[in-house]
Image: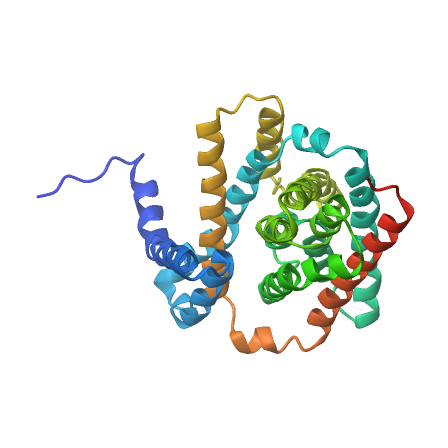
Amino acid sequence: MNAPLPLALAPSWERLKRFYPGVALCTVLALAGSFLAEHYGAPALLLALLLGFGFASQAGEVRMQAGVGFCARRVLRVGVALLGARIGLDQLLAVGWLPLAVVLISVPLTIGAALWLGRWLGLPTLHSLVAGAAVAICGVSAAVAVAAVLPAGRLEERRLLGVVVCVTALGTVAMLGLPPLTALLGYGDIASGLFLGATIHDVAQAAGAGYLVSDAAGDVATLTKLLRVALLVPLVLLLGVLLRRGESGSGEFPWFLLGFVALFAANSLGLLPPGLRELLVSASQWCLLVTMAALGMRTSVRDLLGQGWRPLSLLCALSAGLALTVVGLLALLPVV
């Protein structure tokens, strides 16, 4: 006869049994998305999300709900906290003042335009905020980081997923379409790198587009893009304070922001060994993959498509506006 579990272990064991089915399925979908991305070159986050759509009916089962919900919220926050290991002050110092000027002007303008245009289109303010952060800073990572800061229940998951899907597609189009545009605009290597790094949403996409032009343009594009990513730190902290200022009774402190800032500081001070930093960055990517699978499972494709043309129009307008803003700034600022 099996001995009963100690009282201290019983609650933990029960929680593990409750979470395991949903967490296991989300993990398998994340692994499948990563495998497909390695073999077919598509974005892993998008593939995990699409696979999640295919298992949406399973998410409604009672035994799956706790684990899928855990992945959609808690694992997301862990992934955002670990994002801090990707960013350091040395990235800001390496790019010099010109990319800094372009980024500090274009990013606030894009987020402000998102709020204004979203209101004109009749979209919820928080939806517009997430969309603006995704375009202005770093695509999917910024979208999920901002969404993680929002108080629970304030933003529908289908709206976050709409931003994720559309911004990934727009980033792919920009990666292929903007490098030829730099030649038409008569940009040299540095100007091309600045333009691509300041306009394309994802880090890998911006770097890839830059290296399509030249090695020098790729280096500048990568550094400029990382400078945009670095602005995620103050943005997430600011939103965490502002959006929860009136919720004194909530008690749900965004603890993951402390981890985000701690890793950012440790990386900036060189306290993270290269091996540990790579491990943390990889863990962050896996957390986001699991989260995307969970969010896909919790969202109906019909509800996603039912958002209509306005969310896509907002992202397209913001992307075009960002590109025009950067072109204008490069015309005004001295470029070597």
Q: Nearer the viewer, residue 236 or 194?
A: 194
Is 253 placed above or below 37 here? above
* Position in image of residue 59 (x %, y %): 42, 66
List the single residue furthest toward the right.
332
The quadrant the N terminus occupies is: top left
Q: Is residue 167 left or right of residue 4?
A: right
Q: Looking at the rendering, which quadrant does residue 39 occupy?
A: bottom left
* Position in image of residue 84 (x %, y %): 59, 36
Question: Residue at left 37%, top 52%?
Answer: 19
Q: Nearer the viewer, residue 129 or 153?
A: 129
Residue 112 in sight in this render: no
Q: Nearer the viewer, residue 191 or 282?
A: 191
List the single residue furthest toward the left.
1
Residue 158 in sight in this render: yes
Instruction: Give the colour scheme shown.
Output: rainbow
* Position in image of residue 266 (x %, y %): 58, 25
Q: Is residue 123 left or right of residue 31?
A: right
Question: Residue at left 33%, top 47%?
Answer: 16
Q: Is residue 119 left or right of residue 294?
A: right
* Position in image of residue 198 (x %, y %): 73, 49
Q: Looking at the rendering, which quadrant does residue 293 occupy?
A: bottom left
Question: Residue at left 37%, top 56%?
Answer: 35
